Image (cartoon, helix red, strand yellow):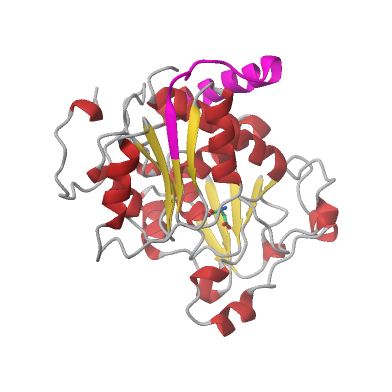
Amino acid sequence: MTDKQNAPANNGKKVGRAPKLDNGFYSQDIISVSQFTRENLEYIFGVAEEMRAIVKRVGSTDLLKGSVLACVFYEPSTRTSASFIAAMSRLGGTVIPITQGVQFSSVSKGESLPDTIRTLESYADIIVIRHPEMGSAQIAADYARKPIINGGDGVGEHPTQALLDLFTIEEELGRVDGLNVGMVGDLRYGRTVHSLARLLCLYDVQFNFVSPEILRLPLDVMNEIRNHDLPVSETYDVSEIISDVDVLYITRVQKERFADLSQYEEVRDLYVLTPELMEDAKEKMIVMHPLPRVGEISYAVDSDPRAAYFRQMENGMYLRMALLAAVLGKA
Ligand code: ASP
């Protein structure tokens, strides 16, 4: 088993991609969904179910009493930061929350990220980081002796979101194999789309991507899907796929990633899920969204039992409790 704390420090050298996870996850970084196998997904989902049962029954436990989580967010966050903080609190640990007003300079040009990480790891046992640059979480992991969890690295990945998304699909529909998954909106800049699409490649699923031309899925993600020989379609029109899908994963257009805001204005309101559109959807299907929504799902859809996005959000806390406990060796 890889034990990061006993490994030599990297002295600032990059060591590349995070390795596949051992089943126990102890002392390992969580940087990319490419580290996961179906086996260790089942393991962590099992732990998340236990966490849900604990929270429902008694609210909290002292499993991680004495442990400290540093939560350092260089980009805005509501759910990821709050659910990690709640997760650590419900496990009896404490949190250093650096989630507001963080100043940063380019990871590739300066040393502020490694220095911040070195500082935080001398106080905390585990660090969750969100940063606007793709690859930043891996860089943090390369410098750190303590485990790093990627809470979103620019347009790269958001692995813990993909885990909670997949956990939600399993909980809601009872399986992943054989499902038809539609992903709608900003497939280019949406890191949650990139991570979930990659993770779903471990299963036998069919993909339907819906976006305008300028927001199509990046080629590297598309190639990964093709390498797995999974059926995939692309269209501009949600109504073409809505009656076929078991999962409709809607995303907001990522305004903050556009260099030219007039381009954003052109595509921002293209897709709005309404009760009328939902009439064509299967009776047993789910609508998901990583949130925040900024108009892509009409509020009138919220009362539809197929609207799973708030349950999905709640699942995030159980899943993150499971990850913290597993990485700190207490699952
Ligand atoms: N909350 C998600 C993220 O951090 C989705 C979004 O911001 O649209 O990527």
Q: Nearer the viewer, residue 307 or 16?
A: 16
- From the viewer's perspective, tell me whether residue 251 is left or right of residue 72: right
User: How many labels sit on residues?
Assistant: 0
| Residue 81: x %, y % from top left | 54, 44
Rendering quarter of residue 121: top left
Q: Nearer the viewer, residue 148 or 182?
A: 148
Q: Is residue 172 visible?
A: yes
Residue drawn where x is 67% and y is 20% of the image: 59
Q: Residue at x 65, y 55 (%)?
A: 292
Query: Would residue 167 be visible to someone looking at this image?
Result: no
Q: Which residue occupies the foreground of this view, 232 or 117? A: 117
The part of the image, by quadrant, that contains residue 111 is: bottom left
Quarter of the displayed picture in which ligand 1 can be seen: bottom right
Report if residue 58 lies within the magenta region: yes
- Judged from this view, the residue extending furthest toward the bottom is 262
On-image quarter of the C terminus: top left
Magenta-drawn stretch contains 276:
no
Instruction: Give the image location of residue 231, x and y in percent.
Output: 49, 52
At 64% across and 30% down in the image, what residue appears?
171
Residue at 31% of width from left, 45% of height from top?
117
Foreground pick, 323 / 285:
323
- Part of the protein shown in magenta: 44-70
Q: Quadrant of the N terminus?
A: top left
Left or right, 28 with reference to 273: left
Picture coordinates of residue 259, whole percent (x, y) = 47, 79
Instruction: Identify whether 272 is placed above or below 259.
Output: above
* Residue 103: % across, % down: 42, 61
